[in-house]
Each structure stands twice: as C-alpha cells, then as structure tokens.
Image (cartoon, rainbow, N blue to C red):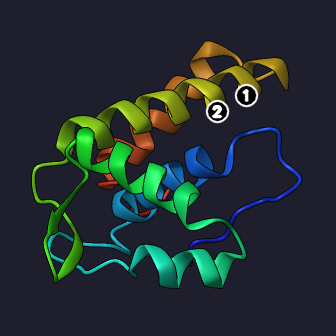
Amino acid sequence: MFDIDLQSRTPIYEQLYKRVVELTVKKQLRPGDKLPSVRELAKALGVNPNTVSKAFQNLERDGMIYSLPGRGSFISDKNGDVIKQNAAEQFTLAAKEAAAAGLTAEEMTEIIRKITETGGNKID
C-alpha cells in the first residue's frame, strides 16, 4: 500500500507524503483510518524511522492526518485543500504530457467533459 521507490531522486519522505495523499484521493484511505506506526511502517519499507516521522510530521502540519498520543496517527476529515492541491498538480502534469503527446485542447476538453458528466466513473 505504501510503496516507495528507493532509486527515485524524490526523497523518501516526500514519496510517502504523496502516497498518503494519493490513497486518500482514491478513497483507499478514509477519514478516521489508522495509519501504521512510524516504527511499523519504517520496518515494512526498510527505511529509517526518522524518514517516516518526517513524512508524518509534514502530513500533520498540512492537515492530512492527526495524531493522538498513545493511540497513533489517523487520516483527517479536514484534508480537502491538500487533496485539491494534489489533484491540481497531477492534472497539470497529465495535461502537459497529453499536450506533448499531441492531444489538442479540444480533445482534452472533450475528455474532461465526459469525466465530469459521468462523475468520474467512465471516460469511454
């Protein structure tokens, strides 16, 4: 679930941050869901606990998660702004790739129209 790329130039804590946001956007993590402890996740990923701790601190700073002493870290129900910002960044990257691949603005607009008409469920 929390896969990271140890060969990536992106720091591991940033990859983990983005992965939690992505899983939240995809509703694979929902408000109130408990995250693994820092030690458990660090062991599972084979990384230093300080790396996971930094990701969790940044997620908490941005309102994506909250921590309860002695109980753990949980997905926040107040994370809409972070999710929207992440979605906008991903959309921008996808649009740039589509334009580079030769899709016209009209073709991209048609895809967006289909997605919004179906609530994002189908774009055939």
Q: Are marks 2 and 1 in contact (CB under 8 Å)?
A: yes
| Quadrant the N terminus occupies | bottom right
Of the residues shown, which amino acid type is indicated by label 1? Ala
Determine whether the residue tagged by mark 1 lies in a helix, strand or loop. Answer: helix
Which residue extends farthest right? 7
- Measured along the vertical axis of the image, is residue 54 above or below residue 35? above
Residue that numbered label 2 is attached to: 94
Residue that numbered label 1 is attached to: 98
x and y percent of residue 110 in the render? 51, 31
Is 113 on the left-hand or right-hand side of 3?
left
Of the residues shown, which amino acid type is indicated by label 2? Ala
x and y percent of residue 4 in the render? 70, 63
x and y percent of residue 120 in the render? 38, 55
How many residues crowd mark 1 within 10 Å: few (<14), some (14–19), many (20+)? some
Front: mark 2 or 1: 2
- Measured along the vertical axis of the image, is residue 76 above or below residue 54? below
| Residue 65 in view (yes/no) | yes
x and y percent of residue 85 in the render? 35, 30
Determine whether the residue tagged by mark 2 lies in a helix, strand or loop. Answer: helix
How many residues crowd mark 2 within 10 Å: few (<14), some (14–19), many (20+)? few
In percent of the image, x 42 and y 29: which residue is there?
A: 88
* Residue 63, label in figure: none
- Between 81 and 52, the residue placed more toward the observer is 52
- Between 17 and 100, the residue placed more toward the observer is 17
In percent of the image, x 34 and y 77: which residue is there?
A: 35
